Image (tube, helix red, strand yellow):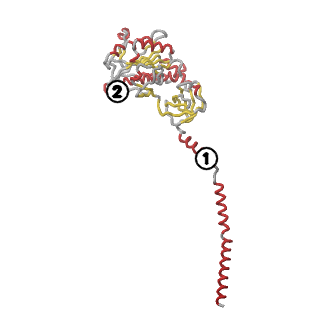
C-alpha cells in the first residue's frame, strides 16, 4: 500500500509540473516571441543594400570635400573683358593671386559682399562660367636677382626670349611699401648718362626720380636708350660701387619696337647688365598695369644688396590707361577724363620706391626715369 501511495504521489507531482510548464509556456512566451519577431523585422529593415552603402559613402565624401575647401575655392559667376566675378573665397586677400581651373591666373582687386572682382593675367576666352577658382595664398611676386641680367621677361617675370628658364633663387613682391625716411640718405652719387646736355644742365643722382616728358617722336626713348648704352664703360670696370644695372620696362609698346631695342642692346654688348620687362600693346590690361611694379621689384633687389640700378618706365601714361580700363570694368567710380581717383596714388607709390639708402641698409640706390607722352 505504501508503494502504491508513493507511485500515485509521484504521478501527481509529475502531472503538476507538466501543467506548470505548459502554463509557463502559455503565459510567458507570448511577449518574448513577439519581441523576437519585432527584432527580426527591425534587423531586416535596417539592413542596407550594397548600392545604398555606396551612395551613402559617396555623399559623405562629397560633403567632406565641400566643407574643407569652402573658404579656399570659388566659382565664376560671370567673365568678360578680362574681368571675372567669383563667388566664394571668403578669406581671400586684396591683390592675392588666384588660379582658375583652366590654368589662367588672376589678381583679386574688388572684395565685395558675396563676390570678388578678379582681373585676369591672360585671355578671358579660356575661363568659363561656373569654373572653379582656387586661392594660392600668395601676393603677386616675381623672380629677382642677377640671374635676370641679359633676359627679356613678361610682366610676371616669365622669360619670353627663348633662352630657357630663369633659375632665380629669390622672389620679391611686386607691390611693396616705399622705404621710410630713416633708411634713406641724401642723393650724393651722380648717374653719368653720357649726354653732356643732361649731365651739365639737369644732372641725375642715384636714388632720384627724373621725368622724361615730351610729344610723340621727340626722342624720349632715344634718351633712355643712350643712357643704358653709355653705362657700358662703368659696368666694364670691376668696381661694384660704380656699376649701374639697367632695367627697361616697356608698357603698351609695339612688339617690333621692343624687339628692335633688345637687338640694339645686344649689338652694343649692353644686355649683360640689363633686364627688359615687356608688356606690349597686345597684352591684357592687368599685365600692363603690373609691369612697372615688376621692374621696380627687380631693381630693388640690386638696391637692397648694396648695388645700383636705374629703372626706365616707357611709358607710365600707358599704365594709367590700363588702370583706367580695369577700374571702369570693375565698376569703380570714375573721375576726370574717366580716370579713377587714385590714379595719382598709383604712380606716387611706384616712384617713391626709388631711394638712395644709407650705409646701414647697404647704401644702394635705384633712380627712376619715367616717360610720359
Residue appearing at x 51%, y 15% in the figure: 255
Q: Are marks 1 and 2 in contact (CB under 8 Å)?
A: no
56 vs 117, nearest the viewer: 56
Q: Left or right of 281: which side holds 6? A: right
Foreground disc of the pair 1, 2? 1
Question: Residue 227: horizontal and vertical position, in percent?
Answer: 39, 13
Element class at badge 2: loop
Residue located beneath label 2 in the image? 183
12 vs 232, nearest the viewer: 12
Element class at badge 1: helix
Q: Left or right of 100: which side holds 19? A: right
Q: Is residue 296 visible?
A: yes
Q: Is residue 22 above or below residue 213?
A: below
Residue located beneath label 1 in the image? 56
Residue appearing at x 67%, y 62% in the figure: 37
205 vs 294, nearest the viewer: 294
Q: Is residue 193 above or below residue 18?
A: above
Label 2, residues with CA under 10 Å away: few <14, some 14-19, many ≥20: some
Q: Which quadrant is the N terminus positioned in?
A: bottom right
17 vs 298, nearest the viewer: 17
**What's the mark number on residue 95?**
none
The quarter of the picture where residue 172 lies is top left
Q: Earlier in the sequence, mark 1 or mark 2?
A: 1
Residue appearing at x 43%, y 20% in the figure: 151
Residue appearing at x 49%, y 13% in the figure: 257
Question: Residue 239: horizontal and vertical position, in percent?
Answer: 31, 18
Amino acid at each position: 500500500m505504501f508503494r502504491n501511495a508513493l507511485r500515485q504521489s509521484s504521478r501527481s507531482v509529475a502531472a503538476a509540473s507538466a501543467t506548470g510548464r505548459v502554463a509557463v509556456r502559455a503565459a510567458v512566451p507570448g511577449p518574448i516571441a513577439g519581441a523576437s519577431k519585432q527584432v527580426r523585422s527591425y534587423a531586416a529593415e535596417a539592413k542596407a543594400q550594397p548600392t545604398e552603402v555606396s551612395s551613402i559613402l559617396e555623399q559623405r565624401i562629397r560633403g567632406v570635400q565641400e566643407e574643407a575647401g569652402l573658404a579656399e575655392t570659388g566659382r565664376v559667376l560671370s567673365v568678360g573683358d578680362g574681368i571675372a566675378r567669383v563667388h566664394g573665397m571668403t578669406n581671400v586677400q586684396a591683390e592675392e593671386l588666384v588660379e582658375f581651373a583652366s590654368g589662367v591666373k588672376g589678381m583679386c582687386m574688388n572684395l565685395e559682399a558675396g563676390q570678388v572682382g578678379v582681373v585676369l593675367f591672360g585671355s578671358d576666352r579660356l575661363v568659363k562660367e561656373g569654373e572653379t577658382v582656387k586661392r594660392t595664398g600668395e601676393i603677386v611676386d616675381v623672380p629677382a636677382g642677377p640671374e635676370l641680367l641679359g633676359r627679356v621677361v613678361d610682366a610676371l617675370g616669365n622669360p619670353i626670349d627663348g633662352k630657357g628658364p630663369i633659375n632665380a633663387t629669390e622672389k620679391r613682391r611686386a607691390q611693396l611699401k616705399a622705404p621710410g625716411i630713416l633708411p634713406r640718405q641724401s642723393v650724393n652719387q651722380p648717374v653719368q648718362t653720357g649726354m653732356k646736355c643732361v649731365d651739365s644742365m639737369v644732372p641725375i643722382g642715384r636714388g632720384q626720380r627724373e621725368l622724361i616728358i615730351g610729344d610723340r617722336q621727340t626722342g624720349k626713348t632715344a634718351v633712355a636708350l643712350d643712357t643704358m648704352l653709355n653705362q657700358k664703360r662703368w659696368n666694364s670696370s670691376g668696381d661694384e660701387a660704380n656699376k649701374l644695372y639697367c632695367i627697361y620696362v616697356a608698357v603698351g609698346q609695339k612688339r617690333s619696337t621692343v624687339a628692335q631695342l633688345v637687338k640694339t642692346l645686344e649689338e652694343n654688348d649692353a644686355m649683360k647688365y640689363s633686364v627688359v620687362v615687356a608688356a606690349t600693346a597686345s597684352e591684357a590690361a592687368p599685365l600692363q598695369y603690373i609691369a612697372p611694379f615688376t621692374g621696380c621689384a627687380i631693381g630693388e633687389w640690386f638696391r637692397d644688396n648694396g648695388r645700383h640700378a636705374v629703372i626706365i618706365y616707357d611709358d607710365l601714361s600707358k599704365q594709367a590707361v590700363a588702370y583706367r580700363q580695369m577700374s571702369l570694368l570693375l565698376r569703380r567710380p570714375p573721375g576726370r577724363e574717366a580716370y579713377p581717383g587714385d590714379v595719382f596714388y598709383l604712380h606716387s607709390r611706384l616712384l617713391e620706391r626709388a631711394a638712395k639708402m644709407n650705409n646701414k641698409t647697404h647704401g644702394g640706390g635705384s633712380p627712376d626715369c619715367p616717360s610720359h607722352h
